[in-house]
């Protein structure tokens, strides 16, 4: 189980080496229902992991379970239940979008008649109903990404693997694509693994995340669960001529009262939320010290902070 | 009893409108065999330029047309020859076994065009990764491609001699009697399938080494014609063994066809040296070489496709 829900993919100590490159190095993780972000810098092992989930490679070490099967041993059986949209622009440019999507539906076992109607449904679903008979090569980057999504969902898979689905999209197209991914995960009943190196988009649509760093899983779990780790209370203060550094003064007061607090700037104090009593301690310190309070907010960690903390990186992806 | 309007339109308040929209698929799902056939059919359409702009149809249809033209011409000659007075003209018309000699170039051209179209675009565009994310694996993917190439090659290895047989038979110029007709039909089927298999294997081997269509076509053509030039040089120029000629890929498939039709093989030496009847290659050598060439070419293709990297 994963956060109280069914586990879709489980990996235990999975390792995979390509020549001298250790792509995955003992990765252990779980993917549950809904949309799961697979986050990591380029070269972190995301695409290799997708290949292992698809059963295209055999792990050197470790075990992998996808929808109850070992994907290497039951490759065809597993892949029949998976949808996959690759990172690169792989669609044949001279073929109509509808023909491409129908063809992929047939490959996944749908009879021709059903494949034809499902292809239309899938293309309508991704917003390309009117454009479905256009050759893929005449479409914009955003439309081609939608065709890739349509071919990944046309056979109604249980799990959809999306490799960098917003690659090359402008902000408007990216927004629309993220909306579609959320729709697939939330409304169409398919589980989604969204592989991306962009923190913001994973945070936007995912309800869980697996963070890869140099082939290892450095953090994983539900977004709510991860962001609740070590919550803080942030106090923003006003300063005046008589007190240029109110934050240091408040931090010292809180420390005297036994609260773990630091001044992150002359006007900001960050206190670790250690039990419900901390609110009273902060309130009393603010009242007694006569501080002018601009904002008092309980803050949870952003995905970027989780990533930076877990990967030990000092900069964003 | 009459109904009032309110009786018809007014419900109990529980009526709801369900949007059609996207629905889960609850229908049947066919197995890997269906996937193989779906890919083979799609590949046949691609090779022939079907469902693609007109410019993609020109070359394949031209090659097919070239293969059928002599058959149509021969049937026309038989039809137009004066009764009883056209013996010399009619002697010129070949039977299905000798017909391959007239369409060698068309078959080679078609094979070197078809196979690269089947394999190269998938590798170049990396659509292969999408195929291998389906129930297909590398072996069934290759099987589908081989079926597609073999099937389209039947258009030029089986169709024209079949047309010639039927055309001649309808004009009473074909085999004598039903049993001869059926025997010739069987020979055509075996020869057509054998040539399709051999040319399919040879023409798939080169595209498996590259992802560029033009390079693969040129390479296949060079391999087929170059093998003829090299084996000819070894046999005639360097006085090497005659059996080396069995490795001439522009000759071997047609030698095999002649043996299937129980016709004498092609001469293996210059007329000035051996006279009009230079000793042909033995049937065992021809069959052995045909099997070996097909197996080696198939193994090269399989080894390359199995080793292709996707989603690394």
Image (spheres, coloured by chain):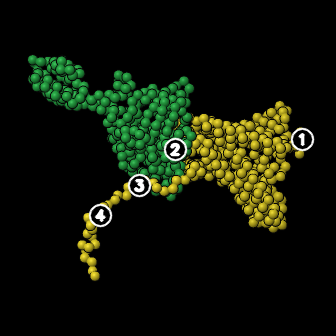
Chain colours: A green, B yellow
Instruction: Give the percent coordinates (x, y) of residue B173.
Output: 79, 63
Residue at 43% in and 29% down: A217
Q: CA distance from mark 1 to mark 2?
A: 64 Å
Q: Alpha carbon of mark 1 to alpha carbon of mark 4: how far?
A: 96 Å
Side of A67 relative to B223 (left or right): left
Mark closest to the chain's N terminus, 4 or 3: 4
Q: Quadrant of the C terminus of chain A?
A: top left
Residue B127 visible in rendering: no
Foreground residue among B156 and A255:
A255
* Classed neighbour count for the residue bearing mark 2: other residues with Cα under 10 Å, few (<14), some (14–19), many (≥20): many
The label on residue A78 is: 2
* Number of the front mark, 4 or 3: 4
Q: Which residue does the image show at 61% across and 38% down from the upper left? A: B305
Q: Is residue B260 above or below residue A19?
A: below
Q: Residues within 10 Å of mark 4 (few under 14, many from 20)?
A: few
Residue under the point 50% across and 50% down: A105
Q: In percent of the image, x 49 and y 43: which residue is there?
A: A68
SS label for mark 2: helix
Q: Position of residue B251 (x, y in %)?
A: 77, 43
- From the image, state whether disc 2 or disc 3 is nearer to you: 2
**Numbered disc 3: secondary structure:** loop
Q: Chain of mark 1?
A: B
Depth check, mark 1 against mark 4: the one in front is 4
């Amino acid at each position: 189980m994963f956060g109280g829900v069914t586990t879709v993919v489980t990996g235990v100590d999975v390792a995979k080496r390509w020549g001298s490159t250790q792509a995955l190095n003992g990765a252990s993780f779980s993917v549950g229902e809904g949309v799961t972000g697979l986050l990591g810098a380029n070269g972190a092992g995301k695409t290799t992991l997708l290949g292992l989930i698809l059963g295209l490679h055999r792990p050197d070490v470790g075990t992998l379970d996808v929808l109850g099967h070992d994907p290497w041993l039951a490759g065809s059986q597993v892949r029949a239940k998976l949808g996959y949209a690759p990172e690169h622009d792989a669609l044949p440019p001279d073929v109509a979008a509808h023909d491409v999507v129908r063809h992929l539906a047939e490959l996944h076992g749908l009879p021709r008649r059903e494949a034809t109607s499902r292809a239309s449904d899938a293309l309508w679903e991704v917003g390309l109903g009117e454009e479905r008979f256009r050759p893929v090569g005449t479409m914009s980057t955003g439309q081609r990404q939608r065709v890739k999504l349509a071919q990944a969902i046309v056979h109604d898979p249980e799990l959809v693997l999306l490799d960098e689905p917003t690659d090359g999209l402008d902000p408007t197209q990216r927004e629309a694509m993220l909306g579609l991914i959320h729709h697939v995960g939330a409304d169409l009943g398919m589980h989604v693994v969204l592989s991306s190196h962009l923190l913001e988009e994973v945070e936007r649509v995912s309800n869980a995340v697996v963070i890869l760093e140099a082939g290892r899983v450095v953090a994983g779990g539900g977004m709510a669960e991860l962001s609740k780790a070590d919550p803080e209370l942030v106090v923003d203060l006003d300063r005046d001529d008589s007190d240029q550094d109110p934050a240091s003064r408040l931090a010292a007061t809180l420390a005297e009262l036994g609260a773990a607090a630091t001044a992150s700037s002359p006007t900001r104090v960050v206190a670790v939320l250690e039990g419900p009593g901390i609110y009273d301690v902060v309130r009393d310190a603010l009242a007694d010290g006569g501080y002018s309070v601009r904002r008092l907010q309980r803050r949870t960690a952003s995905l970027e902070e989780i990533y930076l903390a877990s990967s030990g990186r000092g900069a964003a992806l | 009893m009459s109904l009032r309007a309110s009786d018809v339109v007014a419900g109990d308040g529980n009526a709801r409108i369900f949007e059609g929209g996207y629905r889960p698929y609850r229908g049947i799902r066919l197995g890997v065999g269906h996937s193989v056939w779906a890919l083979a059919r799609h590949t046949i359409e691609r090779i022939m330029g079907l469902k693609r702009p007109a410019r993609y149809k020109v070359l394949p249809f031209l090659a097919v047309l070239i293969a059928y033209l002599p058959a149509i011409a021969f049937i026309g000659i038989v039809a137009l020859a004066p009764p009883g007075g056209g013996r010399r003209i009619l002697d010129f018309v070949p039977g299905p076994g000798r017909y391959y000699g007239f369409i060698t170039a068309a078959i080679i051209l078609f094979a070197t065009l078809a196979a690269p179209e089947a394999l190269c675009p998938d590798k170049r565009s990396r659509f292969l990764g999408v195929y291998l994310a389906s129930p297909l694996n590398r072996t069934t993917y290759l099987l589908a491609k081989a079926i597609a190439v073999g099937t389209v090659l039947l258009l030029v290895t089986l169709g024209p001699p079949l047309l010639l047989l039927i055309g001649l038979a309808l004009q009473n110029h074909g085999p004598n009697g039903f049993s001869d007709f059926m025997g010739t039909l069987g020979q055509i089927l075996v020869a057509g399938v054998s040539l399709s298999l051999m040319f399919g294997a040879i023409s798939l081997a080169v595209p498996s080494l590259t992802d560029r269509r033009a390079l693969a076509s040129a390479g296949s053509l060079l391999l087929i014609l170059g093998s003829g030039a090299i084996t000819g040089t070894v046999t005639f120029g360097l006085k090497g063994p005659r059996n080396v000629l069995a490795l001439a890929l522009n000759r071997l498939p047609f030698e095999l066809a002649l043996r299937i039709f129980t016709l004498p093989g092609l001469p293996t030496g210059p007329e000035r040296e051996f006279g009009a009847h230079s000793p042909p290659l033995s049937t065992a050598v021809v069959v052995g070489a045909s099997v070996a060439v097909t197996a080696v070419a198939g193994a090269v293709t399989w080894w390359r496709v199995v080793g292709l990297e996707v989603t690394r």
